[in-house]
Image (cartoon, grey):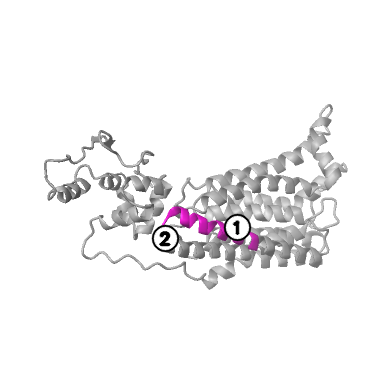
Amino acid sequence: MSGLGELDRSGAPGNGESAGGRAVVSAPEGGGGAGGGGHRSSAARRGTGDPVKALMHRHRELCERAVDPLEIAAGLEAHGVTDRTAARFRHRDVFSLAEEMYARVPRGDDTPPPPAPTALPRPRLDRALLTLLPGALCAAAVTGLRLTQGRTRLLVAAVGVLAVALALRGVLRRGPLGARGGTRSGRPRTGAWTCWLLAYAALGDGLLRSAVAGGPDGLPTGAPDGPWPFAAAPLLTLTLACAPAAGCAHLLAARARRRLDASRGLEEFTASVQPLLLGVFALFLCALGALSALCATALDEPDAYTGTLTLGTLLFLARLLTVHGFTHVPAVVLGAVATAEALAAATVFAGRLPGCAPLSAPVEALITAWGPASVPALLCGAAGLPLLVHAARTLTRASAHARTAHPC
């Protein structure tokens, strides 16, 4: 939101204070009799000493492009205006202040009326089917790996990786899991880190197990019993989870929009959206747990529920924030987890060098006690908890659910 100045935290300027570099002079008291009091009060509100006019000047671009008062309210909140600040502008809350600002914006006669409060549209069928594509392609690739041998298996693995990566790219760019065109903090990419974390979920545990045992003796072949074991169940679970993640993201956006239309204050909106966010998070966690158990049973692989659940919830929270335009923190968190996983594997190999055995001691002790899946579970869990707190503070703000949200 270029060109918008930061609002003075002290609220509306009073006598002797300045608004945008100009002195604000209040209406003179007395001298006008009882009959002129109302006229002078109106003149003070609309004249040079009008605090709302000064606020509109600071946020002129926001007011001119807003399609309804709710968008102005969300923009003001994003710039630090609270209900307490709105009281200094002689309004009970930010919503009331936004309504006056919207009404005072000059518009031509051909300007269409503001749209009626509505929830987000239903998800489009093509984009809903797109969320099923990564899981379907991953299931086909895993089946091909189980039925082939030798070079054919390597070819199937290469084609499967490419197909799943392209499908994930489409899901993360379109529909309920796609980022908005305009973001709050630039547009750092999270797709590359997501693919890295998924690749580690499939190959990382096998690499650590082989490295601790002195291997690996060769490259991964796609077989669960090879020198570098391939874990298909976590990868299949997380790709299948794209569909429930998209459904939960759309549910949160639609219900939050309805409550934004019905709320009359920022605190009221936040109080109503917090249980909604936690409920959507719990719903996705249940769906992810069911998919994890189903895939582990179908593929007859040892369960790694903790690692799969922690990684799945981390990716879901990162996508929720990205969908609503907050991309910086998710990119930093996912990048930190991916880097830590790479360093954990690197320390095991570095410990083989003369005099460097202490480097690998923490990771080897953790693997010996809890297994290789404990490394990503610990890292994703440690990153997921603060990300959940950040989402609970960020996604319960009205500015996170402005009417400019992309269609699903």
Q: Nearer the viewer, residue 286 or 161?
A: 286
291 on left or right of 13: right
- Give the amino acid at mark 1: Leu
Q: Residue furthest bottom?
A: 125
Q: Residue furthest front?
A: 34
- Element carrying mark 2: loop
The percent position of residue 55, horizontal first and vertical second, equals: 30, 45
- Give the amino acid at mark 2: Arg
Residue ID at (52%, 53%): 395
Q: Residue furthest right?
A: 213
Q: Nearer the viewer, residue 247 or 261?
A: 261
For residue 276: magenta?
A: yes
Between circles 2 and 1, the one closer to the viewer is 1
- Element carrying mark 1: helix
Q: Earlier in the sequence, mark 2 or mark 1?
A: 1
Question: Which segment did they paint magenta?
Answer: 265-283
166 on left or right of 61: right
Is residue 312 something that shows in the picture?
yes
The percent position of residue 120, horizontal first and vertical second, equals: 47, 67
Is residue 155 something that shows in the picture?
no
Q: List the residue tagged with mark 1.
A: 278
Query: How packed is label 2: few (under 14 Cα within 10 Å), some, or many (20 or more)?
Result: many
Residue ID at (27%, 44%): 51
369 on left or right of 100: right
Q: List the residue tagged with mark 2.
A: 403
74 on left or right of 234: left
The percent position of residue 389, horizontal first and vertical second, equals: 59, 48
Residue ID at (23%, 59%): 107
The percent position of residue 165, horizontal first and vertical second, equals: 63, 58
